[in-house]
Amino acid sequence: MSHQTVIVLDFGGQYNQLIARRVRECGVYCEVKPYTTPLEQLKAMAPIGFIFTGGPNSVYEEKAPHVDPAIFELGVPVLGICYGCQLMAHTLGGQVTAAQEDTAREYGKTETYYDTTCKLFKGLPEQGISWMSHGDYMAKVPEGFALTAHTDACPNVAIADEKRGFYGVQYHPEVNHTQHGVDMIRNFLYEVCGATGDWTMEDYKNTAIRDIREKVGDGKVLLALSGGVDSSVAAALLAEAVGKQLTCVFVDHGLMRKNEGDEVEAAFARWDINFVRVDAETRFLLKLAGEAEPERKRKIIGEEFIRVFEEEAKKIGRVDYLVQGTIYPDVIESGAGDAAVIKSHHNVGGLPDYVDFKEIIEPLRLLFKDEVRQLGRELGLPEYLVMRQPFPGPGLAIRVIGDLTKEKLDTLRDADAIYREEIAKAGLDRSINQYFAVLTNTRSVGVMGDGRTYDYTLALRAVTTSDFMTADWARIPYDVLDRISTRIVNEVKGINRIVYDITSKPPATIEWE
Ligand code: XMP
């Protein structure tokens, strides 16, 4: 694949992936590389521009990350953000010091004034809010640089040497709080680096299909389909590329949400592939019967999943390639810290090591999640699959608290479907990142008609989060909660009380088990 490439050089800041996503959103391909990557390797990628990220250090500290100064001799434009800006200034002969209290140290939203004759700010307003997060100050800017933006507290929040194509900003243009921040990044890419916007999903799709066909030849490909976004999009891509040579094994453990198994199967009906749906509900429920302890439930499901998959793989015989839905955030190497960590993520966790295959194909490993969704749309997957919220591998088993029965699962499925329907109707399905119902094993007394009931309490969970590591409970409007509650107690037998979970993570987790 040959695209114009921008390299995001990572100095360990917290927004580094966000910078890369912004660049991609502007239609330009980019890769995140640790700052320790040898210059020769970076040169070999023939970048049209570099973006130096922020980072937790101060450039004047002994152990602070540095770059090979020769990077500035390549004739390639550089945009330095926060630490990246200070590093550029420091390396090119400027002076960076710790800011004095109340002078040039800035955090948070700050009114900023821009020189719009600078290419970075071309066509943008002369004034706006920017998001600052820096404790250092450029006491002296390097030769050749002009000051191009300031705040009331700080005279030099942006610098530029337009002749050499070097730009630096102390604030974070990549975060939403910075007004027109993305436009500034776009200006850097198109006005300074000469980007043409050749990164589109249609192009990616066509190239990926060609590459997969070349690699696979007439070999056999196996994919474990979970119904999640990544494995579904990977499956659709492979289906388009190699058709009948692909076998998707979809283990339906009976712990899916309402109609989910059928929806997944229907989405793949248009491709002429081998689609194996293993109806394993009975064997999963048998294994889980009487088990109330959350960790044991998870373990049983994980193990049983592997057993089923193995059995199916054996039936298929020797496969040449196994597909995994690894995505870009899982393969980015971090630029700072003592050890560079590369995570390897398995979409369907814990596949057996000894499934007989020659090689792994990871067709999404260059894509961010939002790009995976875009690719899914490009391949014609329905919106409900492409926009699917995260769903845990153990499925509803960890949302029925305590021991499982088919009856309880069905009750939860019905209630959860109403919840999701009402959230979508209220237009909240995009702003809430994950929402689901939990069948508690608490029963309480109620009154319905003229009679007494003694039924289950259902909990509603909804969170907003960007990384799922921390989360806040979503402020669903009362009238929406009211509609959901009324419908569920009226329409779902066995539930007579609804509660709303108002705990954040931490201290709670998103799932209840
Ligand atoms: P917790 O409950 O740990 O969940 O706050 C964080 C996110 O991870 C999802 N989750 C899982 N996903 N297999 C998965 O693929 C699992 O076993 C699993 N457990 C939790 C959860 O839905 C949330 O998005």
Image: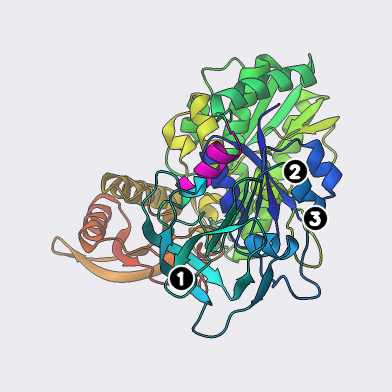
Residue 323 in picture, x, y percent from top left: 72, 33
What is the distance, in whole Å, between disc 2 and disc 3 at their CAs? Answer: 46 Å
Work out whether residue 368 or residue 403 is closer to the camera in this orientation and state it: 368
Q: Disc number at residue 510?
A: none
Above or below, 488 against 55 in this view is: above
Q: Is residue 192 magenta?
A: yes
Q: Label 1 belongs to which residue? A: 108
Quadrant where ligand 1 appears: bottom right
Q: Label 2 belongs to which residue? A: 351
* Circle nearer the viewer, 1 or 3: 3
Disc nearer the start of the sequence (2/3): 3
Residue 362 in picture, x, y percent from top left: 72, 35
Q: Which residue appears at 42% of the width and 68% of the height?
A: 109
Residue 139 visible in the displayed image: yes
Do the CB atoms of the residues marked 2 and 3 lie less than 8 Å apart?
no
Does the beta carbon of the residue at mark 1 sit less than 8 Å from ligand 1? no
Amino acid marked by disc 3: Pro
Q: Which residue appears at 33% of the width and 67% of the height?
A: 499
Residue 135 in picture, x, y percent from top left: 58, 76
Magenta-highlighted residues: 183-195
Disc nearer the start of the sequence (1/3): 3
Residue 468 in picture, x, y percent from top left: 54, 59
Amino acid marked by disc 1: Gly
Q: Disc number at residue 69?
A: 3
